[in-house]
Image (cartoon, grey):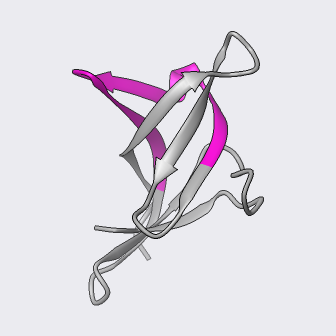
Amino acid sequence: MNAPKIGWIPVQISPGALSSEWAIAIHTGDKDLSLFADKSQVMQVGDAHQLRVTIMAIDEGNHTQTVLLPSECFENGSRWLILPV
């Protein structure tokens, strides 16, 4: 097993409940998820924003990656997300 790596995923942001956080919206194609994340976990690239995640595994056969989010999603209470590579 390879060591976890840092990755970035595209997100939409809006002000969070606290001044130090963003409300994050993740659109994966088949589901929409939301969570709060510290502002230090978000990077702006032009007009777009990306959320820092930890890539835990890549399944080359299925062309997916399993990532660990910085906090739990409201919809399912999980920090785990499987995304296309």
In the rendered structure, does residue 20 fall within the stretch colored magenta? no
Query: For the C terminus, which image quadrant?
Result: bottom left
Residue at the spot x=61%, y=63% of the render?
Answer: 80
Please state if 79 lies on the left or on the right of 77 as rendered.
Answer: left
Residue lying furthest top? 19
Name the foreground residue: 6 vs 35. Answer: 35
**Bounds of the magenta span?**
34-54
In the rendered structure, does residue 47 fall within the stretch colored magenta? yes
Q: Identify the image quadrant of residue 49.
A: top left
Residue lying furthest left? 46
Q: Is residue 53 above or below residue 37?
A: below
Q: Is residue 38 above or below residue 55?
A: above
- Which SS does the magenta portion mostly show? strand
Please state if 60 lies on the left or on the right of 5 as rendered.
Answer: left
Residue at the spot x=54%, y=64% of the render?
Answer: 81
- Count of numbered tags: 0
Q: Position of residue 57 (x, y in %)?
A: 44, 71
Q: Position of residue 64 (x, y in %)?
A: 35, 75
Residue at the spot x=76%, y=20% of the render?
Answer: 17
Please state if 71 lies on the left or on the right of 54 as rendered.
Answer: right
Q: Is residue 47 above or below residue 28?
A: above
Residue at the spot x=46%, y=70% of the render?
Answer: 30
Name the foreground residue: 59 vs 21. Answer: 21
Q: Position of residue 27 (x, y in %)?
A: 45, 53
Q: Is residue 62 above or below residue 19?
A: below
Name the foreground residue: 5 vs 15. Answer: 15
Q: Identify the image quadrant of residue 58.
A: bottom left
Please state if 2 lies on the left or on the right of 67 as rendered.
Answer: left
Q: Position of residue 70 (x, y in %)?
A: 62, 43
